[in-house]
Amino acid sequence: MTVEMSQKTILVVDDVPENIDVLDGVLHDRYKIKAAVNGQRALKIAMSDNPPDLILLDIMMPEMDGYEVCRRLKDDEKTRGIPVIFVTAMNEVEDERKGLELGAVDYITKPYSPAIVLARVKTHLTLKDTLDNLEYLVGLRTEQLQNTKDATILALASLAETRDMETGNHIRRTQHYVRVLAERLQENPRYQNELTDEMVELFYKTAPLHDLGKVGIPDEILLKPGRLTPEEFEVMKGHAALGRQSLLEAAEMMDGDSSFFDVAGDIAANHHEKWDGSGYPNGLKGEKIPLAGRLMAVADVYDALISKRVYKAAMSHEEARAIILEGSGSHFCPDVVDVFRDLEDRFLQIAAEYKDED
């Protein structure tokens, strides 16, 4: 909500106390006034826990002039949004241009006209309120859209998973496994350029879509209460390509950034590839397997091993751990297995937090 003008705080900065008194006399009936007689004191007040809503800043001051004060205010994220109005006896066009280029919003020349001072201050406080409210509304709307997108992703992933009645919270566990693996792998210098914080978040958000292609697998195969025949397994393997194709088609509909669908497609297509090239659907080998797929492979297999299925009992963590470690360099990327070994406690915590209901 917009704060009433009477509650606003104005910081007046001038090395001549008489000039501060003049502006205080003009403004104090409507605003709370703070004062500083030098640039350092002005910066300290502006960067405090109770910063001013607007600054009236003299230019000609010793040690640190108003231009330098303004530059430092605009260089700091905390104070960048505070409107600065220069107050000065200087009225040359070049002086005004320099101040506006530094980020000031206006100029008031001495001697002061009370009506002009009040009008300019009110105008820029109102403008700041409007911009702040607009930023708040845009931020709120962006958050709402992101939450809607996240919920839609989980709903879509859950739709695919619910066709396989045994999966339970599999998608939630695996997306958290992927995130902790990626975050730890960031510490490896070989992956620092690829594994930005933004990419780790993309891996986390897209991981639930890894089995999206299951919606295209016939029920008699997907829901078979037992092991698949070789022929049936060939059909089941098709879910990786089906998922990628669906996500690629979604990416083609995007006018702008399609990175979300590109990463989701990498996970869907490649989480069954194996480090030694014996996986599917394309038999990719080693680092030719996208990193998203390599991370998902460990997360997906671990969770499948510790989960109960119609055709098998759940393994213990120790048994699943042994299989993952044994698969390093054959089934799984060795670097990902190394971080898995370091993160066993986190995997156990995630498995417990998102365990399936009996």
Image (cartoon, helix red, strand yellow):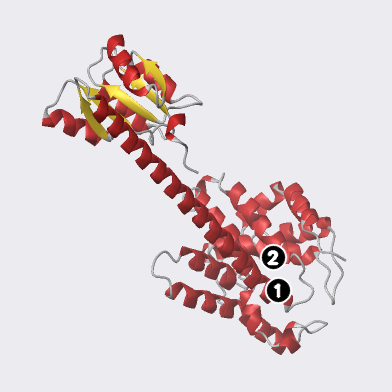
Q: Which residue lies furthest to the top in this view?
A: 17
Position of 358 relative to 55 (above/below)? below
All told, the count of numbered labels is 2
Position of 40 relative to 221 (above/below)? above
Q: Say which residue label 2 marks.
A: 171
Left/right of residue 38 with respect to residue 304 in the rendered view? left
- Whether label 2 touches label 1, CB < 8 Å: yes
Sequence-first disc among 2 and 1: 1
Which residue is more in the foreground, 344 or 85? 85
Position of 281 relative to 122 (above/below)? below
Q: Of the numbered discs in the image, which one, if any, rests on residue 161?
A: 1
Location of residue 299 in the rendering, given as x and y in whole percent from the top left corner: 68, 61
Location of residue 175 in the rendering, given as x and y in whole percent from the top left corner: 65, 60
Position of 14 relative to 136 (above/below)? above
Q: Can residue 237 be seen in this view?
A: no
Residue at 35%, 23% in the rendered image: 27
Task: Kindly report the distance in space between the C-alpha atoms of the residues bearing marks 2 and 1.
Answer: 8 Å
Residue at 46%, 50% in the rendered image: 193
Residue type, label 1: Glu
Location of residue 248 in the rendering, given as x and y in whole percent from the top left corner: 48, 75
Quarter where residue 6 is shown? top left
Residue at 81%, 66% in the rendered image: 307
